[in-house]
Image: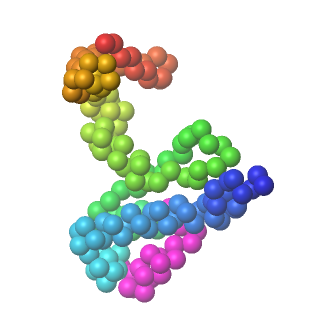
């Protein structure tokens, strides 16, 4: 019964690699649609055959890092290999999609290093909280504005965030 509760990628290392490889190829195909570029043009950029590109995109198998970097560069992309702890050591939810990491990176201003990450965070932010006063006063929703100060501190290479309202 325990095995049924786990994500399908926990079956084997090969299953986990398949999921990660599929996720990577999906990123490449999205980029091909955005640019746009077809498989023939990508093959020319990579100095490989169109058949090799088709095989890579349709059956990446045990994706090699060198191939990932070459294909990404061929599409004007970069590659980052990220190991992370999502609090799910038994893999009940499976790996986090690369799109989650990409969107979070963009939301932080697309920093390229730790120092840019720190400067990308605004020292002051304004939050609007909505609360329902209709329950007690029959009045409409009212915005509540809170000014909050954001302080970044670091100690022994650990970064902490303190919010002050």
The residue segment tinted magenta is 47-66
Q: Is residue 98 left or right of residue 17?
A: left
Q: Position of residue 106 (x, y in %)?
A: 30, 44
Q: Nearer the viewer, residue 154 or 65?
A: 154
Q: Is residue 113 left or right of residue 8?
A: left
Identify which residue is drawn at 23% across, 27% down: 141
Q: Position of residue 75 (x, y in %)?
A: 31, 67
Quarter-of-image position of residue 13: bottom right
Judge whether residue 58 is colored magenta.
yes
Q: Nearer the viewer, residue 13 or 89?
A: 89
Q: Is residue 53 left or right of residue 138?
A: right
Identify which residue is drawn at 31% across, 19% down: 136
Quarter-of-image position of residue 35: bottom left
Q: Is residue 157 above or below residue 76?
A: above
Q: Is residue 32 visible?
A: yes
Q: Nearer the viewer, residue 96 or 7?
A: 7
């Amino acid at each position: 019964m325990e095995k049924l509760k786990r994500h399908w990628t926990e079956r084997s290392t090969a299953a986990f690699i398949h999921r990660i490889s599929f996720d990577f190829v999906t990123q490449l195909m999205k980029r091909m649609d955005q640019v746009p570029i077809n498989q023939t043009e990508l093959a020319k950029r990579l100095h490989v055959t169109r058949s090799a590109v088709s095989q890579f995109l349709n059956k990446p198998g045990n994706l090699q890092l060198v191939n990932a970097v070459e294909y990404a560069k061929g599409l004007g992309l970069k590659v980052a290999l990220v190991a992370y702890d999502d609090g799910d050591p038994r893999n009940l939810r499976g790996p986090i999609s690369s799109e989650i990491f990409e969107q979070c990176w963009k939301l932080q201003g697309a920093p390229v290093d730790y120092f840019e990450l720190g400067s990308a965070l605004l020292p002051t932010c304004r939050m609007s909280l909505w609360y329902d006063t209709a329950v007690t006063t029959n009045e409409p929703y009212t915005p509540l504005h809170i000014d909050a100060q954001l302080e970044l501190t670091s100690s022994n290479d650990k970064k902490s965030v303190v919010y002050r309202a």
